[in-house]
Amino acid sequence: MSLTKIGRPSLQRLCLASHQPASASLRWSANSLSIRLQWRSQHNSRKSPRRFGQPSTSERTSPIQQIREEQVEIIPPTAGPYSASGSQYSEPGYEEYEQPNDPWPKVRVRYLRPAIWSFTVTAGIFSGLAYYQAKKEIEQAKKATNWLQVPQWGLQPQSRVGPPSATELATRWWTELNPISKVTWGIIGANSAVHLTSFLIPRYWDLLWHIPARNRNYTNFTSMFVHSGPMHLAVNMWATYNFMLPVGYSRLFEGNAPHVGAFFLATGVLSGYAQHFTTMFTKNRRPVPEIFIRGGGASGALFGILGAFCMEYPTAQLGILFLPVHFEAQYFFPAIMLFDLIGVIRGYSFVNFGHAAHLSGALIGVGYSYFNGKDNLWKPMVRFWKQRLQNA
């Protein structure tokens, strides 16, 4: 989970670069300045008559130019829904507090509803994939009992002359992959495709990020598929490629692809909410309030995978990118968790990571392995659905 800081000067330049208002807050600023300019022009016309051919004050200075000259602070458009008068709509969950020297709007961020939504989606992910696993096992059992197969008569396909096409190579490569590798490449493909939309349809790509002030619950799920840049995407997908396979074939998952997929997605949702929840305590820690900083990335889910890896392979050697040093996982991983814990409590001036998402994902991975989620959660859910399907 990476956090991208929104700077006010860059936001002002972005809003002022367009001739059309970039948001309703900009229209409100322009309208208020226009009313003030009209009042000034009327006052000046009463005080001293305007000469023939001389433009009035409102004609000489447009509202947009006046904003440039006075450097009026523009409220970011992602802060919430605004009306043309500058006040917020009467949407439930929002509340505005007037502070003349504070350019950021005061909005009420929801914390209970996102929690209910996140835990409900997590339960739905586990239940849905457990149902898929149960149905798959029943179908395989039926095929095993039908040992007498009807012979399939027909002409044998002729051997192809010439090299295979790209589609045939891709199909053959995908068919020969093991189940955990299919999950791994599916995650890499999904994240890469979503990142590609940042160039094709950036407007919709921006809606996938999680900004607490928006109060959009669905972004706790979609934010795990967006990344701030190629380097962020490359590092996370490199970690997915390296850690997903050994974790998937550990004693905790035993090569069960639906189980691994459920754990990855559920950890991503819960770690995203953890990052959202910590903004309750860190609203005024930075020049830009935490509730207006967007968050995204698969790091929370990957820290869950990394936590399970360190629990299943405690003596494995881990290192830091681009550094030729390695440490045992049972010693290296607690140091990473301590780093993120300090980041959650007081933050760092030199880096702005999603420390709460990292720490919560790591705790989920460690706890799921320590309490044996395979026998205490996954298998009971699969048995439940198998009994339901067999009795249906």
Image (cartoon, rainbow, N blue to C red):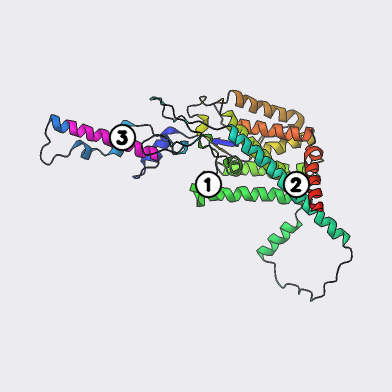
Amino acid type, mark 2: Ala
Report the span colored magenta.
24-43
Q: Which residue is mark 1?
A: 205
Residue closer to the observer: 129 or 19: 129
What percent of the width, then of the height, locates residue 221?
61, 42
Residue at the location (58% across, 49% down)? Answer: 194
Amino acid type, mark 3: Ser
Q: Which residue is mark 2?
A: 130
Residue 51 lies in quadrant = top left
C-alpha span from label 1 to label 3: 33 Å
Let me know if residue 242 appears in the view: no
N-term-proximal mark, 2 vs 1? 2
Residue closer to the observer: 55 or 124: 124
Q: Which residue is mark 3?
A: 32
Amino acid type, mark 1: Trp
Residue closer to the observer: 266 or 302: 266
Residue at the location (60% across, 23% down)? Answer: 345
Tell us which disc is closer to us: 2 or 1: 2
Residue at the location (43% across, 33% down)? Answer: 8
